[in-house]
Amino acid sequence: MNLPNKITLFRIFLIPIFIIILVLPFEWGTLEILSSNIEINYLIATIVFSIASFTDWLDGYLARKMNIVSNFGKFADPLADKMLVMTALVFLIEFSLAPAWIVAIIVSRELAVTGLRLLLVEQGGQVMAAGWPGKIKTNTQMLAIIFLFLDDFPLAFTGIPVGILLLYICLFFTIYSGVLYFYEARFVFKGTFSR
């Protein structure tokens, strides 16, 4: 068990802690930050989510720097990311902090791209690397979740909440990167619909 894999396991371990903080049935109270009243359990959950999100970058960075590639890492790292993000998105819907239709599109895209990656590996052992649109999608997604849990500070001069703005940017790159992945891997489906 190498260090990047241990960090990935730590990220998976943080997911139930994130859930427990959000569902514990007692009043945590609120805290005023920058003229916004933030639920303390949201604040603690956001800190846990932020630490988990940082480990996503850290385990990848260490794996590249140490030149470590393992089957467990290839399986667990993207799985941990999706578990973390999807868990947070479900809670954002439950607390009426994000529109369900946007979350449905994000989750559908993640499942479709995951299926495509599995198909590519099965057909030729090819691993599809994340391009810049996918990286923008991931970063805006995680930042949107953080700002949405932190009571959405409005963007100066516009009044648009930062979390909502980031969520819409994430939505654009979710769709764009998903279409791009399928276009670049269209050869996988060649002849599929011919009779």
Image: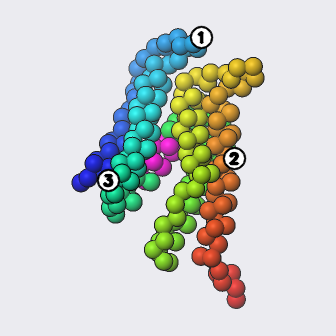
Where is residue 192? Give x, y as percent. Answer: 64, 81
In terms of sequence position, does the residue under pointer 3 or pointer 1 come before the other?
1
Quadrant where the image shows the C terminus: bottom right
Instruction: Identify the residue shown where x is 62% and y is 62%.
Output: 181
Instruction: Name the residue carrying label 3.
Output: 66
Where is residue 7? Give x, y as percent. Answer: 32, 45
From the viewer's side, name the closer residue of 114 and 28: 114
Quarter holding residue 74: bottom left
Element type at mark 3: loop
Q: Which residues are magenta?
A: 79-87
Instruction: Name the residue carrying label 2.
Output: 172
In the displayed structure, 70 sits above or below 6; it is below
Where is residue 18? Give x, y as percent. Answer: 41, 34
Asked if disc 2 and disc 3 are in contact, CB closer than 8 Å, the reply is: no
In terms of sequence position, does the residue under pointer 2 or pointer 3 come before the other?
3
Query: In whole angstroms, how far apart are the C-alphas of marks 3 and 1?
Result: 44 Å
**Which dot, 3 or 1, sits closer to the camera?**
3
**Which dot, 2 or 3, sits closer to the camera?**
3
From the viewer's side, name the closer residue of 120 and 2: 2
From the viewer's side, name the closer residue of 69 and 81: 69
Element type at mark 2: helix
Instruction: Identify the residue shown where x is 36% and y is 51%.
Output: 65
Query: In whole angstroms, how far apart are the C-alphas of marks 1 and 2?
Result: 30 Å
Point out which mark residue 136 bears. Answer: none
Furthest residue toward left: 1
Query: In whole angstroms, how far apart are the C-alphas of marks 2 and 3?
Result: 34 Å
Instruction: Name the residue carrying label 1.
Output: 35
Furthest residue toward right: 158
In terms of sequence position, does the residue under pointer 1 or pointer 2 come before the other?
1
Amino acid type of the residue tagged 3 in the rendering: Met
